[in-house]
Image (cartoon, rainbow, N blue to C red):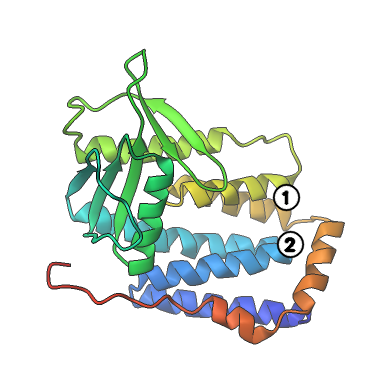
Amino acid sequence: MSASSRQEKVDEIMDRAEAALRRSQWFEAERLAVRAMELARAQDDFGTMARVALPLQEARRQRVQEALGAKKLTILESGAEITEDMPLKPGCYLVQPPAVGADARRLRLAALKHEVPIAVMCREPRSRLGLCPVVAIGMVTVRTRIEPPKAWDKPDPKWFVGAMEQLGDAAIAMLDTGIELDRQIDFVLSALDSVPDHEKLHQLLGSLCREASKGFVRSQHADALDEELAGVDESELAADIEPPTKRKRSAED
């Protein structure tokens, strides 16, 4: 596949993503924007990545707003089984021991698969200083210690939202601004895999990509990716962006 053909494919995907946003289909828009971001990164097309960052941020922002709008905070108690097929309702979910960060990620991915708007946080046992460690697992591990809720067993939604924000801020603080710009971008992409609902991370990604688009020299690694992608059939790429099979919603959903 030529570079121009790949660019046309990215443009086509983004047209579909933006159309999904206009229809308020946040999950479809997010899936498409993520795929467009992956393809643009494979081409070192940082200008396109900067353009994709905003609709990706918006799709996720709207999804999170629906979750928060449910005004329901569920604590997954000890012994709760977290599986890909567990029944979910819109709202906020707080995962805590014995469940761990990997369980919170499994829960978030299950909700994306079934298109249920939820927000997920994982907290660990209170530290010796009385702080509350929160963690996100993905391509990188993000962890920080924050003030605990006033009532440990009954955290309020305001604390939950604040915890989400502080976890994303911790991911930003992990960025090494002294490394090459493309490596900074890759770190932010990895951080977004772990903390996808943080708006400032998306804004940082867009800013770095705009800076890189002004004059970034392609690496030998990128040339190797071009050769690899040249052998990929377009129908395979199209299959990658098809939405997952939706489960039947019950009346309670």
What residue sits 24% from the left and 28% below the top? Answer: 149
User: At label 1, which amino acid type do we have?
Assistant: Asp
Q: Position of residue 245 (x, y in %)?
A: 38, 78
Taking 154 as reference, is 215 above or below it? below
Q: Nearer the viewer, residue 211 or 143?
A: 143
Other-residue count near label 2 (Cα within 10 Å), few / some / many at <14 / 14–19 / ≥20: many
Q: Return the x and y of residue 213 as percentages of the image width and height.
A: 72, 58
Q: Is residue 178 above or below residue 181?
A: above
Amino acid type shown at disc 2: Asp
In the figure, is residue 212 to the left or right of 30? right
Furthest toward the top, the residue is 129
- The image's mark for residue 170 is none
The total of numbered circles placed on residues is 2
The residue carrying mark 2 is 44
Which secondary structure, mark 1? helix
Give coordinates of residue 96: x percent, y percent.
Answer: 30, 36
Q: Quadrant of residue 246?
A: bottom left
Q: At 24% from the left edge and 59% from the top edge, which residue is drawn? A: 88
User: Does the residue at mark 2 contact the one at mark 1 (Cβ under 8 Å)?
Assistant: yes
Residue 22 in sight here: yes
Would you say 36 lies left or right of 74 here? Answer: right
Q: CA distance from mark 2 to mark 1?
A: 9 Å
Q: Nearer the viewer, residue 145 or 103?
A: 103
State the residue at coordinates (84%, 65%): 223
Residue 199: % across, % down: 44, 49
Secondary structure type for disc 2: loop
Instruction: Report the residue that reaches farthest toward the right.
Output: 220
Query: Height in image: 179 above or below 57?
Result: above
Residue 182 has which mark? 1
Quadrant for residue 44, please give it.
Answer: bottom right
